[in-house]
Image (cartoon, grey):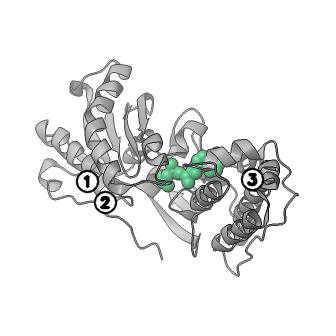
Amino acid sequence: MILAVETSCDETAVALLDRSGELRANVVSSQAALHARFGGVVPEIASRHHLELVFPVLEGALGDADASLDDVDTVAVTQGPGLIGALLVGISAAKALAWARQLPLVPVDHLLGHIAALYLAPSAVEPPFLCLLASGGHTLLLDVRDHSSFRLLGTTLDDAAGEAFDKGARLLGLGYPGGAAIDTLASSGDPGAFDFPVARLEGLDFSFSGLKTALLYRVRDLEPEELERRRADLAASYQHAIVQALVGQTLRAAEETGAERIAVAGGVAANSELREALEGAALAPLEYCTDNAAMIASAARYLEPLPPSGYLGLDAYASRRLR
Ligand code: KG4
Ligand code: ZN
């Protein structure tokens, strides 16, 4: 089995995937509640909690799979992009596990991991496809032609879609992380109640900062009782504008590239309005949209492992140049 570790942000996750592609365990311990009172992830707090959680989560995964480390033949770990201290905890744990047993190690790019959520059974999708990858840190349109790489078609010029959800939620007093909270509240609101701007960019890029400012002004202009009464309408209209921007650029990219299939992954792919709007697309299964280690194990299946002599110096990276 492949044992995968993911600690790039505020989820401590370990998964076990067997060679036939069957997921044997997928444990995710979210620290979100710990960071909520700060309104976002505090990197140093995240690192410390990863350190406390990584081995209990590993033991939980082995327990779920009814397996031991003897059943593991490869270790995989998220190398970046993400919070550097958080990544280093996962990388150190993975290196130690692999080295102690002289197993090969596969460093996995987190973005490739989100895409690889689409390769998990039972509804696995095969490349080529056009992928919309929308998360808290990225909003990307990618041309995916094989399991181990992608070509960038478009990206956000400012905030990521998930970041827009999180900042919007904060303005609406919904707490952190906000995407799921907006999604829930929006279901009882009117998406046409407020007219929020959808940035229309020339190429295949995105921009969400104007939208966030527009919400800020709307919220500021409303009396407290009015704001309370119209919160669901604001959430629905705001979400609608984000989804419109994502869907619009994705369809434009599909047309321009002649892509026959569209796939959607990343935390924002959990959004119900987006899933409905791109109904015909291959949607990453809900439980593998937000950060998890199953997707990292899935990506590792298609990557070259490093032998023990090759990974002791392996380092994390916080970001990577995509264009
Ligand atoms: O992929 P992910 O777990 O972490 C990153 O790699 O960034 O994505 C987290 C992002 C957060 O911004 C969160 O608010 C958003 O995904 N998200 C959602 C939903 N569930 C999570 N956004 C909209 N609707 C949702 N249901
Ligand atoms: Zn992620």
Is residue 7 found left or right of 256 in the rendered image?
left
Residue 249 lies, in percent from the top left, at 71, 68
Distance between the alpha carbons at the discs numbered 2 and 1: 6 Å
Query: For the N terminus, which image quadrant?
Result: top left
Determine whether the beta carbon of the residue marked 3 sits less than 8 angstroms from the nearest atom of ligand 1. Answer: no
Q: Tell me the amino acid under the disc marked 3.
A: Ala
Element marked by disc 2? helix
Between 100 and 261, the one nearer to me in the picture = 100
Residue ID for mark 1: 88
**Do the residues under discs 2 and 1 have CB atoms within 8 angstroms?**
yes
Q: In front here: 221 or 116?
A: 221
Picture residue at 60% right of the left edge, 50% below the top = 178
Question: Residue 84 — which label?
Answer: 2
Left or right? Give the position of 289 relative to 19: right
| 3D distance between C-alphas at marks 3 and 2 | 33 Å
Which residue bears the numbered disc 3? 235
